[in-house]
Amino acid sequence: MVWKVRRKGDGAEMACKVLNKEKMKQSTLKSTADEVMYYQRLKHPNIISFFGGYETRRKLYILQEMMAGEIDDEIGNLTESQIQHVMSQVIDALEYAHACGVIHSDLKPENIMISDSETMQIALIDFGLSKSRKRWEWMTKVGGTPAYIAPECLGRRYTEAVDMWAVGIITFEMFFGYVPFQKVRGNAIKTITNSLKGFEARVKPGRGNWFPEEHRISEDAMSFIEYLLKVNPAERLTAPEAKHHPWITNEVKESSHEVSGSSLGFVLQSLLQKRNLNKVQQFLRQVVSSSARKQMHPFLMRELDVMFKKYDVDNKGYISWEQFHETISSLVMKYDNIQLSKRDVNSFMKSIDTSRTGKVYYDDLISWLTFRHLSAQDDRVWDAVMALDIDANGLVDMNDINRVLKNPDIKDKVSMETIKAVKEKVGKGEGLEYIEFIHLMDTMSTDISRSVPVS
């Protein structure tokens, strides 16, 4: 039961949820306590505000922000721009929650409330099934609503990527009025299993796990849904990446030769984040990145490509420091979201131009960007390290490293001194377990620690 109440001091309206403890199971009581804990911990404009809780022998009273309605009631009534506005707020809330180490775990239209019907401001609710997660820790306990549960949950090994799958399902449902994967009444496992066949990112007649021909939406909207409904969580957009997808940023470009300020800003700031790598770590970064370029999202690669080719008109594969610096300086002036200092740029140039040629090579930029892309999500790092283990023995050993060294693009850039140092680290014993190898790349566990976005 929910009552509309007023605070005596200032007359502010709020919702008071009244729960009868005598009728609640122990598991429900725990879920409610967890929910309150997350509300106290998470403070964001797009997460419902918590004003306090009170308990008597028989009742629980939870005071929360008053809501104006549910998004679930608006499905079928919203324009594409309104759906984009709603989903951009959902992503903002998730970016914040994930940075705080919190997975919502039960995202669905019923848990997206409208806090202001005029501006269509929304707030996420119901954190009763949420999980707290640390880096390199996988969740195993599955809960939520089957139609929105990500396929990797079947293996009881998942991360915050499950929330992004749910965002893809919800976005699809808001456009078309149904979920893309068939629900099986009374069979949660079968419903989730249906998602394993993957989403067909094409338009054809009828209903199913594809875009219906009868209801056309923009190319950017289809791209957004496609990159969220990836069965492999390593290929799925993270919340920060989704936030900079062209459909969410809603930038209009005059031609394909013009960069997106939001997307390129995200790319450049990812590239230029502070890093302190020794030679072994630099080599391991190249090794891991070489196996993972296919996972890069095209819209991120495209912006870097457009920027680079503006100067590399002869397709030499490199541009000068001055040209790279000039490009970034002009973008900083043009776009508010790109905040990079000259010191940031110089530091990056020194770290990428290790041979001091005065040149910035496209392949090196892509290698750095791939590494940052990988390190943004644990599933990606794990998949990339697994890809190195060619004999699938659960270890990364010198046989795996030597195989990578057969690639001239990597071997020609690595000194014998570095190879010797790598052999001393990796070659001891039978090799390194995946998590040991990951921790050897020290920046992956320290340099990329979560930073909480400013709400």
Image: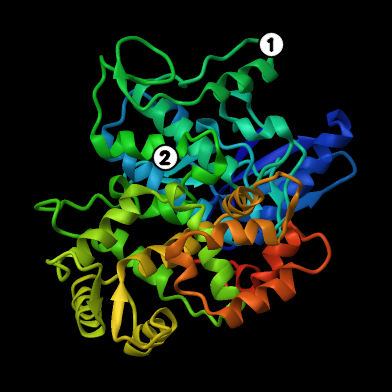
Q: Say which quarter of the image contains residue 351.
A: bottom left
Seen in the picture, residue 111 relative to 283 is either above or below; the reply is above
* Residue 202 disc label: none
Can you identify the residue that label 2 sits on? 227
Q: Say which quarter of the image contains residue 8.
A: bottom right
Residue 374 in the image, given as x and y percentages of width and height: 52, 57
Q: Around disc 1, counting alpha carbons within 10 Å, would you say few (fewer than 14), some (14 to 19), or many (20 or more)?
A: few
Q: Nearer the viewer, mark 2 or mark 1?
A: 2
Viewer-side residue, 198 vs 73: 198
Hey, what amino acid is under mark 2? Tyr
Pick whichever of labels 2 and 1 is earlier in the sequence.
Answer: 1
Q: Secondary structure at mark 1?
A: loop
The quadrant of the picture occupied by the N terminus is top right
Residue 201 in the image, given as x and y percentages of width and height: 36, 27
Per the model, the C-alpha gap separating discs 2 and 1 is 29 Å
What residue is at 29 percent from the left and 63 percent from the top?
Answer: 264
Viewer-side residue, 91 vs 221: 221
* Marks 2 & 1, CB-CB < 8 Å contact: no
Residue that extends furthest to the left in the rendered view of this protein? 254
* Residue 186 disc label: 1
Hey, what amino acid is under mark 1? Gly
Residue 205 in the image, given as x and y percentages of width and height: 30, 11
What residue is at 61 percent from the left and 61 percent from the top?
Answer: 402
Residue 23 in the image, given as x and y percentages of width and height: 85, 28
Viewer-side residue, 404 vs 278: 404
What residue is at 72 percent from the left and 68 percent from the top?
Answer: 426
